[in-house]
Image (cartoon, helix red, strand yellow):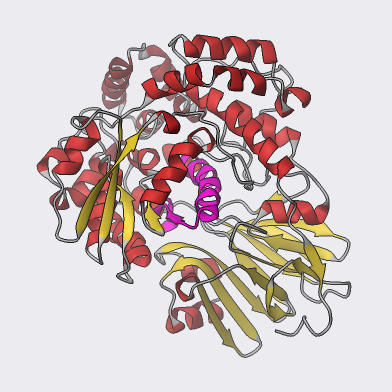
Amino acid sequence: MSNGMRGTGGGQPGGTGSAVVPQGARVRWSDPLWWTVGNWAGRLLCLGAGQSARIAVFGVSEAGAADLARALAAPDLGAAVRGWPGAFVVVRAVDGRVEVLADAVGTVPVYWTRTATGVVWSTHARALAALAGDGPDPAWLGAYLRDQRVPAARSAFAHVHRVPPGHRLVLTERGAGVSPWWSAPAPGPYMGAVARLRTALTGAVRVRAGAGEPVSTDLAGMDSTTLTVLAERYGPVTGITAHPRGVTAGGDMDFARTLTLPQLTRRTFELTDRHLPFAEAELPATDQPPLSAHLWAMFSAQLAAGLPVHLTGDGGDHLFQPAPTHLADLVAHGRLLRAARDAGQWARLRRISPVPLLRDAFARDVAALAASGAGATTPWLTPGTACHRDPVDRNAAAALTDSLRAAARRAQADTELAASAGVELHNPYHDAAVLDAVLTARSWERVSSTRYKPLLVDAFGDLLPARHRARTTKGTFETSFHTGVRARLPHLLDHCDGHLAALGLIRPERLRAALHRAALGARTPWRALLAVYGAEIWLRAVGNAPAPTWTVLTPARRTP
């Protein structure tokens, strides 16, 4: 592992072969083997021990000695840690059995692979790929290009598996097994969900800003503004608002000015031609294509303008402004008039026909509803490009969970990018406790065609200025995307004949045609186009970066 990254992992208990760890790893336990790499501050790593049992919590949490003791003795580890604020993975070793609990959203990923000496797991897929001697997986890339919500049990590298969110990896001397520990909570009264969301999101911010050290936030939309207000309760906050050069009023700029807090320092970040999408910048290697690959020039500069701990509002749209999957739930519960009204209002706002929405709702085709408004087709993908997805249950709760998990998975690569720049990037909306709180509201109560993010406003509206409570839109920089394509067109056209074309996943001539249309300002399926660009840049970064190295443990090093 490199670039100052933190990582952790371990091996199968009772192994008799040569144990291996990444270069520079610190062995914490010897049998079962557990190690860490990088600088783990006290708040990011909590350890506990009992009679012939040990437990570790890594990530952001408030786990104290009493919490660890209860979790160590609990018959159901998942039930014991569910509800803790933060984003973390728990490892418990008891009597030759290791349990690795992946969080319900997947904010802190867990990967594993089989070796000649047993199963090895880690929080970094690229490290395990180097151990297994494998590279990027073309089938995974094909699924990613078609739909970024890729299969949960696979990583971007061949023969490196991922523990799906809300699942546990259990290791014994006999082998490994993966099973679920989390399920969606049952919905209850709406005001109970509002109160629970307020508690959960406050806790999510507190575990990151509660030490009183200064943090920075993106002071822009309602999601990030809410985080700013909560973080300011615990210490100084620098709120950063991005704006195009020469634009000093309107949009996010005006909303940011309405927020006045004693410990808030507002700072603007001017976007120049150097920050245009697709601006050339060297991308560090990550475990999968980063969400911000096309914005790395801007993203890295904005991180430098902030503080070493930065909170983003990523995930808020997925939780509070989802696709109209609730229409299927309305039909299933016999609320047909409400379904027809919501379908009509949703379609009118997007200038589409409500008929397909109602048809999908009556068929309870949640996957189709989740894809509503996704945009045009992608003719540059080859017919054989794989698109194998995990099935989604026929309800809105499963669709929302699936959407947030996909967002958290993509954002994890951005967290790696930020770490390479020396910044801790946190996404409080991706915490499992926040997801649990949102799911306790019925799907048709979480959304509204006439109110913007009603659940979030009802939970935190009293803390926000009136102008924010009345907000109905969010800022967009789509114009800059067209400008970025025009400015970098030769560079982008060169990428059309790169790694993805060599793998047979794209048709270069059709991709070039799409880029020419985007440069002219034509309507563009940006999500699909950015996926291709991100995957191509990622493949180049992985190919150019030194592979993580592993070393065999000597008997002396096996004892921590």
Q: Position of residue 97 (x, y in %)?
A: 71, 74
Q: Main secondary structure of the magenta part?
A: helix
Instruction: Tell me which residue sits at (82%, 53%) in the image.
Output: 132
Residue 41 highlighted magenta (yes or no): no
Hey, which residue is sitting farthest bottom in the picture? 51
Residue 21 occupies which quadrant of the picture?
A: bottom right
Q: Is residue 519 left or right of residue 15?
A: left
* Number of dots carrying numbers: 0
Q: Position of residue 269 (x, y in %)?
A: 31, 41
Q: Nearer the viewer, residue 191 or 304?
A: 304
> Does the image show residue 533?
yes
> Does the image show residue 76?
no
Hey, which residue is sitting farthest left in the picture? 466
Q: Is residue 369 left or right of residue 353?
A: right
- Vertically, is 78 above or below 372? below
Q: What is the quadrant of the N terminus in the image?
A: bottom right
Which range of residues does the magenta coloring cover? 403-432
Residue 410 highlighted magenta (yes or no): yes
